[in-house]
Image (spheres, helix red, strand yellow):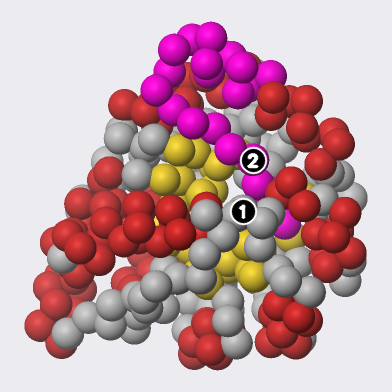
Amino acid sequence: MIDLHCHILPGIDDGAETMEESLEMCRIAASDGIRTVFATPHVKEAVYENDEKSVMPVFMKLKKAVEDEGIGLSVELAAEIHISSTLIHFLHHNRAFLIGGRYFLLELPPETVPSNMEELIFDAQIKGFYPIIAHPERNSILQKNTRLIARWIDRGALVQATAMSVTGEFGKAPKKAVSEIIEKGLCHILATDAHSPKWRPPILSHARDVLTEMVGKQEADRMVSGRPMEIMKGEMLSDKPLRISAKTKSFFRRRILTNRGKK
């Protein structure tokens, strides 16, 4: 499996605090069957003023430590970039944060949706940058209106859901929203968005198992391996997410409301 969204770099955002925590997260990811993890530090004006130059030394230190420890995990660099008026300018000057040379993780505010999203997606693509909308199921507006997500996908954006939303560990609202997003074929990939070894660990397998029962093994594997691999290589996706049948919808609605995620 490939994890395209993980706050695993130590001491630069709200993720891992120390190198020891980072290495523990790497061990957890490797034990879970993740073979490649992308370190995606937050980039947010006046909050996390991270850029390529400041992040690269921390990334290289972690990468070397993982190799020295013999952890069976490849660590790559990207970023989770908060939407802003300077987004495209930032991408031009921080290309190390692009996945496969063209994709980037785009973070929305938790309780609002910018009115110019479609324009931003179009403008980014004109410049050769393709947004992956990070965890839309956790945005309070999108929880009530997934039609907006469909419009952004039509414009060329991709969508990444979070594993702990699928398993229910983020609560009822994200769990309900992610079920609708997946049912409608609006989710391309699954990632951990891990922040720590304990309270938000880098584990994909639990959510993958839920997806397997919901949409079948082939589509679940595409969400955690196939599409992330194509993105990592900078390729355009070879397929669209599966829109599930009424029968499967009925099953998933029963499954998503169980206590599986209340661990």
Q: Quadrant of residue 77?
A: top right
Residue at point 64%, 70% (across, down): 130
What secondary structure is marked by label 2? strand
Where is residue 253? Give x, y as percent: 20, 73
Where is residue 3? Give x, y as percent: 45, 45
What secondary structure is marked by label 1? loop
Give the residue pinned by disc 1: 99
- Residue 199 visible in image: no
Q: Quadrant of residue 35?
A: top left
Q: Mark number for residue 25? A: none
Residue at point 71%, 49% (across, down): 97
Residue at point 54%, 32% (across, down): 75
Question: In the image shown, does 25 or 1 lie closer to the viewer?
Answer: 1
Cα–Cα span, label 2 and label 1: 8 Å
User: Quick one: quadrant of the C terminus?
Assistant: top left
- Residue 128 visible in image: yes
Badge 2 crowding class, 10 Å Cα cut-off, few under 14, some 14 to 19, many 20 or more, is many
Horizontally, residue 148 falls left or right of residue 85, namely left
Asked if 76 appears above or below 249 in the picture, the reply is above
Counting labels gives 2
Give the residue pinned by disc 2: 77
> Magenta span covers which residues?
61-81
Where is residue 72? Give x, y as percent: 39, 23
Horizontally, residue 105 falls left or right of residue 167, namely right
Asked if 261 appears above or below 218 in the picture, the reply is above
Where is residue 197? Give x, y as percent: 47, 27
Residue at point 61%, 17% (across, down): 64
Q: Amino acid at mark 1?
A: Ile
Horizontally, residue 19 falls left or right of residue 67, namely right
Q: Amino acid at mark 2?
A: Leu
Q: Residue 114 in magenta? A: no
Question: In the image shown, does 12 or 142 lie closer to the viewer?
Answer: 12
